[in-house]
Amino acid sequence: MPFRFSLESILSFRKNVEHAEELSLNKILQEIASAQMDLQRIETEYQLFRAQRDRDLTKGLPAAYLQELIEKEQYLENSIETLRVQLRDLDIKRMAQLSVLRTAQQNREVLAEMRKQKHTTYQREQNRREQKDMDDLFLTRTKDDN
């Protein structure tokens, strides 16, 4: 009789849950990477803008142009702050998802260990039965020879 683990369907379900949680974590990590790249791009743009603005301020420029510079600077500063807040939120989300994933892994590992122990026990019993059958066969043949 082949080995059969009575909780195999639950183990399979827990594996699927763990996989889904891993995918969720990977999605969050991708969002973090994307936000970090956006932040880096905007910070670089901001640094270049400030250098250009400093050069422009040494020239005599119309007030309307200076107002545009101020508005663009505020826009870039707001964008940077928004991305930093987004990154903090994503990091909190990442930590929470990591906790959910660890729980899913532990749940799966408990059943996987149970399955392993049951399979080991099953194999020991199977080996004992085979040895008993071989011993019985040997005794039967020895008895028939006498």
Image (cartoon, rainbow, N blue to C red):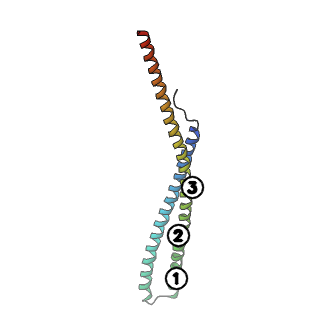
Residue 135's disc is: none
Q: Inspect the image, locate mark 2, and give the three-letter code of the amino acid beneath it.
A: Leu
Q: Which is more toward the observer, 113 or 130?
A: 130
Query: Which quarter of the figure has residue 45?
Result: bottom left
Whole-percent x, y for residue 109 in the image: 52, 47
Q: Is residue 87 left or right of residue 51?
A: right
Query: Circle 3 is placed at which residue position?
Result: 100
Gap between marks 3 and 2, in whole Å? Answer: 25 Å
Q: Inspect the image, locate mark 3, and give the three-letter code of the amino acid beneath it.
A: Val
Crowd tier of the residue under label 2, counting other residues whose Cα lies within 10 Å: few below 14, some 14–19, many 20 or above: some
Q: Secondary structure at mark 2?
A: helix
Gap between marks 1 and 2, in whole Å? Answer: 20 Å
Q: Inspect the image, locate mark 1, and give the three-letter code of the amino acid beneath it.
A: Ile
For image coordinates 55% across by 57% down, the residue present is: 99
Q: Earlier in the sequence, mark 1 or mark 2?
A: 1
For image coordinates 54% across by 46% down, the residue present is: 110
Above or below, comparing residue 130 to residue 102 in the picture = above
Query: Circle 2 is placed at which residue position?
Result: 83
Q: Earlier in the sequence, mark 3 or mark 2?
A: 2
Query: Circle 1 is placed at which residue position?
Result: 70
> Is the C-beta separation of discs 3 and 2 under 8 Å?
no
Above or below, comparing residue 111 to residue 133 in the picture = below
